[in-house]
Image (spheres, rainbow, N blue to C red):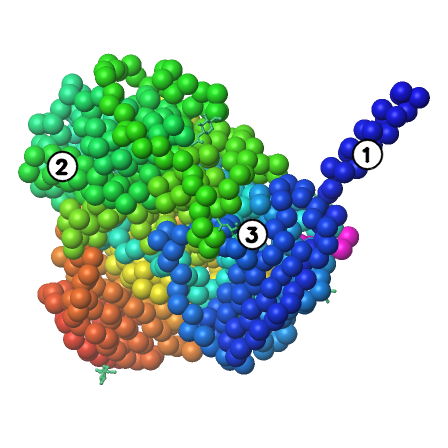
């Protein structure tokens, strides 16, 4: 008897508790109010709360707006507006233009009971997003929404990851939780969060979906008997969706840029070749690296300082023995003299040490995150025990700017050209919440002295008024019941503890994913305060939606392996074309591990066709500067020369993206949206509109299977015409080479010769290569400015070249005054290319007639 009743009690208890997501009642819409351009409704829990991973929120609101003819905004949030919403200061939202539904390219339709919604393409009725069939769950620590998808969808984005560019749609999961991720693990969350995806449906059009939510999240994509779906599972925040109509892939990119911002324009010099290494032992050694590049006759534009330069790994200090100030100033001076640049690292963790000025001044300004008792919240980073800037505190910008201005003062300090933010996921060597931050972790020992604490005002989370979007009170901020598959473990493992409150009252639990992005933005503003009209250059490891408007990004601590070489292509495609971060690249030749000669040569060549081009390695990795092997040196020399000759072409593409979001790097299907065969191509890309790059991608490969769409192309190196057939063909490729094809219909501007620095390059004359399309015509662009001003005002030239079959017309705007000329015109096609030489000023329009008088040459475009 006793036994029976015990069992019964157990069953009763579990029966009361064991709700599953299937028991959740969903919501019912009421009070639907429609206008021409908007819809609002109340959503009410449609039954008994299931409370599976928190408390069901009974009352929600739905707000739908046709913001432009191509952008639909759908927000589902709690009626009290207590649930966290991403601050406007972090991601300013664009204004709605309030267009009537009748002129929108995509339409919203509401299903009232049970609540769901469908987004369709107006012209065709194609269903783009359909949440019918699975109940919405909106709880205090769990929000779920699912859309069904057509079979075998082509989905991209949801960065940052190291997986296929086009997702596997069987049991695939993307996790959003910014984490230090050595070796860029596969199928895992990495350093950044970009919760937007692009859905490519060939001739039926392409659209985009952005969930503006910074909370931890699992996005599940799976195919079952009832079809394919994509399901959002977040541990907080609201369902703030933007839908982008496309219909061309590049339209989606531009429409997304209208919401998160187009990438910041970067300086001309940043397209030069960069060299870095963690573990360069001294400033003398760095000078040797510079000299050895010069001896090897490999143009080196930018030298980087990793944490080696710091005294005991502390920001804003120099190792007095190995990197003393006088020698460092001399190095930077010499680099500048030679037209080269210097960039240095700053980590977010500030050493908690009495007498250490950045800590003392930061304490005084109260800029650090505070623990529950009002003391500084502490963790472990390179310097040892550290405190963490609260980038949302109103004093932080001023403090950070002053530290940067002091340390990087051109007169007394280090006159850097850019800054590098590492470890800014909030990477914490304190592995979990039992860690004692005063214990020694990976740091070098350092003297500890008396520490002045913060003022005793205890900063605890107040109960905040409704409507402030600060986050619900009384949540489990460490181990919410719904678990995201963070590869580091729990939310707070190896990062800033998620129960910390930011100055504005929000919790790290909700804002963790943009900690790094706000650091990068603060660094950018500091550089701007230092040099108000100079384009800042900031490289950041951690990113969030919209970070491109402030900073460049490298793909983190990869490995010196062919797989990582290939991954760098997929990551570039996703960041540039899908996430609006144009200035990106990998650590060339790999960060961790031993770079093999052949792989490093191939990587040196391949990465010269990516936007950000930097060789970097770990302290434990053998040296891999390009001059270390003859074959790599030869390959790099040729690659850099070609890159520099094309630098203005690249600059033009990057400038265009910074203007309107048109991607500077595109997957093949962006350029040929009709060709669905190209949907899975992730080893070739268009750099700008005209150049299709197809590197060797097999391990130690000697050739590559190139896919060319059905169109006219020209071999970039020989000028020979190649007619694409919508299939692949094999090309053998020498170690120093890389197949590149000019798309028919393009005019490609180049410098007539390369140079050792980009400053010198800027004095060289131009040539254009005309690659006629099947109609015999071609066109292209060239953008010119001073290469460094933030606001160039009217001092810029937008040149366009038009080839009609016999005449090259140049026209445009001519605000940038220079003595640059066009010196050579090469027309491809026919048996041999035609070349006309002359001197045409780029300060005004001109026409070049290219008749029979011109020399016919068997031309090599570039050799
Ligand atoms: C949305 O999905 C549901 C469930 O699969 C389906 O019954 C419905 O027809 C779909 N709506 C549209 C407009 O296709
Ligand atoms: C995906 O769907 C398959 C087929 O229904 C199922 O066996 C599998 O468990 C699902 N995987 C995930 C991660 O949901
Ligand atoms: C520079 O080159 C010299 C001569 O080859 C070599 O001895 C030295 O180790 C190199 N130093 C570095 C830092 O590459
Ligand atoms: C966060 O949690 C830790 C561990 O339980 C605790 O010591 C600390 O006081 C909490 N911090 C805040 C700000 O509540
Ligand atoms: C917020 O509104 C709810 C009811 O809508 C009320 O119960 C609660 O007390 C309010 N909270 C505050 C802090 O005003
Ligand atoms: C770079 O400098 C070297 C040595 O001064 C010179 O030989 C070489 O021609 C220069 N390269 C270019 C591309 O200007
Ligand atoms: C250049 O463009 C302007 C403005 O469109 C036009 O007025 C002018 O005629 C053009 N010049 C040439 C040489 O085509
Ligand atoms: C093309 O160039 C080759 C090699 O220079 C030359 O022999 C041939 O006559 C040229 N053909 C034409 C049509 O100009
Ligand atoms: C964690 C992880 O995925 N590491 C990978 C890094 O790259 C090497 C070489 O490609 C792989 O073997 C590792 O699995």
Q: Residue visible at 13% across and 30% down?
A: 328
Numbered disc in front, either 1 or 2? 1
Pinpoint residue 441: horizontal percent, then vertical percent: 38, 18
Does residue 199 show up?
A: no
User: CB of residue at label 3: within 8 Å of ligand 2?
Assistant: no
Q: Where is residue 459 in the image (x, y as percent from the top left)?
A: 36, 35
Neighbour tally class for label 2: few under 14, some 14-19, many 20 plus, Cα within 10 Å: some
Q: Quadrant of the N terminus?
A: top right
Q: Position of residue 564 (x, y in %)?
A: 46, 38
Mark 1 secondary-structure assignment: helix
Closer to us: 614 or 185: 185
Residue lying at the far left of the rendered structure: 411
Height in image: 350 above or below 116?
above
Does the magenta segment cover residue 672? no
Q: What stretch is highlighted in magenta?
A: 225-230
Q: Quadrant of residue 163?
A: top right
Residue 406, which numbered label? 2
* Number of dots carrying numbers: 3
Q: How far apart are marks 1 and 2 (CA)?
A: 67 Å
Residue that carries the numbered disc 3 in the rendered image: 166
**Element class at badge 3:** loop
Residue 119: quadrant of the picture: bottom right
Give the CA distance from mark 3 to mark 1.
Answer: 47 Å
Q: Name the residue under label 1.
A: 12
Q: Say which mark, if any, is on residue 373.
A: none
Of residues 431 and 730, the one drawn nearer to the viewer in this rendering: 431
């Amino acid at each position: 008897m006793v036994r029976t009743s015990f069992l019964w009690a157990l069953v009763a208890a579990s029966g009361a508790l064991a709700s599953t997501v299937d028991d959740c009642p969903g919501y019912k819409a009421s009070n639907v109010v429609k206008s021409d351009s908007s819809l609002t409704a109340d959503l009410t829990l449609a039954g008994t709360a299931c409370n599976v991973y928190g408390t069901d929120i009974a009352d929600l609101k739905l707000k739908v707006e046709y913001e432009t003819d191509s952008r639909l905004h759908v927000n589902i949030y709690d009626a009290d507006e207590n649930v966290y919403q991403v601050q406007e200061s972090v991601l300013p939202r664009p204004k709605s233009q309030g267009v009537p539904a009748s002129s929108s390219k995509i339409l919203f339709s509401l299903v009232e009971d049970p609540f769901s919604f469908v987004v369709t393409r107006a012209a065709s009725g194609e269903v783009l997003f359909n949440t019918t069939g699975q109940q919405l769950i909106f709880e205090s620590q769990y929000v779920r929404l699912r859309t069904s998808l057509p079979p075998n969808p082509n989905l991209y984005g949801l960065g940052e990851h190291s997986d296929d560019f086009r997702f596997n749609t069987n049991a695939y999961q993307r996790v959003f939780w910014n984490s230090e991720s050595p070796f860029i693990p596969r199928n895992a969350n990495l350093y950044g969060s970009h919760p937007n995806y692009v859905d490519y449906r060939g001739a039926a059009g392409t659209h985009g979906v952005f969930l503006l939510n910074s909370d931890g999240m699992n996005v599940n994509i799976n195919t079952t008997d009832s079809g394919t779906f994509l399901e959002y599972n977040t541990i907080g925040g609201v369902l703030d969706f933007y839908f982008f109509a496309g219909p061309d892939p590049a339209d989606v990119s531009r429409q997304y840029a209208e919401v998160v911002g187009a990438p910041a324009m970067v300086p001309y010099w940043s397209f030069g070749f960069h060299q870095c290494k963690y573990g360069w032992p001294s400033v003398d050694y760095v000078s040797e690296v510079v000299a050895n590049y010069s001896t090897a006759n490999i143009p080196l534009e930018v030298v980087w300082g990793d944490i080696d330069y710091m005294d005991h790994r502390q920001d804003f200090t120099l190792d007095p023995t190995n990197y003393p100030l006088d020698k460092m100033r001399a190095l930077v001076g010499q680099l500048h003299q030679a037209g080269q640049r210097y960039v240095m690292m700053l980590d977010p963790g500030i050493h908690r040490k009495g007498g250490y000025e950045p800590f003392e001044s930061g304490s005084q300004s109260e800029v650090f995150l505070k623990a529950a008792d009002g003391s500084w919240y502490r963790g472990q980073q390179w310097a040892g025990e550290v405190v963490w800037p609260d980038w949302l505190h109103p004093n932080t910008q001023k403090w950070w700017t002053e530290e940067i201005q002091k340390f990087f003062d051109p007169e007394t300090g280090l006159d850097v050209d850019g800054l590098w933010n590492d470890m800014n996921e909030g990477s914490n060597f304190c592995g979990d919440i039992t860690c004692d931050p005063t214990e020694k972790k990976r740091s070098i020992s350092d003297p500890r002295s008396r520490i002045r604490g913060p003022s005793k005002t205890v900063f605890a989370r107040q109960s905040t008024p409704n409507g402030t979007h600060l986050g619900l009170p009384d949540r489990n901020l460490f181990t919410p019941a719904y678990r995201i598959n963070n590869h580091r473990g729990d939310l707070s493992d190896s990062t800033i503890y998620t129960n910390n409150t930011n100055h504005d009252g929000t919790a790290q639990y909700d804002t963790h994913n943009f900690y790094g992005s706000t650091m990068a933005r603060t660094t950018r503003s500091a550089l701007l305060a230092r040099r108000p009209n100079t384009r800042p250059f900031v490289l950041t490891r951690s990113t969030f939606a919209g970070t491109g408007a402030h900073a460049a990004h490298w793909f983190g601590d990869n490995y010196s392996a062919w797989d990582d070489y290939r991954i760098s292509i997929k990551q570039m495609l996703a960041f540039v074309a899908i996430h609006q971060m144009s200035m990106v690249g990998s650590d060339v030749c790999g960060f961790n591990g031993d770079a093999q000669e052949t792989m490093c040569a191939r990587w040196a060549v391949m990465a010269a066709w990516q936007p950000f081009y930097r060789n970097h390695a770990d302290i434990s990795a053998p040296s891999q500067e390009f001059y270390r092997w003859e074959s790599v040196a030869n390959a790099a020399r040729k690659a850099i020369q070609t890159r520099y000759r094309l630098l203005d072409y690249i600059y033009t593409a990057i400038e265009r993206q910074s203007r309107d979001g048109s991607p500077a790097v595109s997957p093949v299907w962006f350029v040929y949206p009709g060709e669905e065969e190209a949907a899975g191509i992730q080893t070739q890309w268009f750099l700008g509109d005209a150049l299709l790059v197809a590197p060797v991608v097999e391990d130690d490969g000697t050739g590559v299977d190139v896919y060319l769409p059905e169109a006219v192309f020209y071999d970039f190196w020989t000028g020979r015409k190649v007619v694409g057939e919508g299939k692949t063909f094999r090309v053998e490729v020498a170690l120093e080479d890389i197949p590149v094809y000019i798309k028919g219909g393009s005019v490609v501007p180049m410098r007539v010769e390369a140079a050792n620095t980009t400053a010198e390059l800027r004095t060289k004359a131009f040539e254009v290569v005309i690659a006629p399309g099947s109609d015999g015509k071609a066109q292209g662009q060239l953008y010119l400015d001073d290469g460094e001003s933030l606001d160039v005002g009217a001092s810029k030239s937008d040149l366009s070249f038009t080839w009609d079959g016999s005449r090259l017309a140049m026209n445009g705007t001519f605000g940038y005054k220079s003595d640059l000329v066009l010196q050579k015109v090469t027309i491809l096609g026919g048996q041999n290319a035609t070349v006309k030489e002359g001197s045409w000023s780029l300060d005004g329009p001109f026409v070049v007639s290219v008749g029979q008088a011109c020399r016919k040459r068997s031309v090599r475009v570039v050799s």
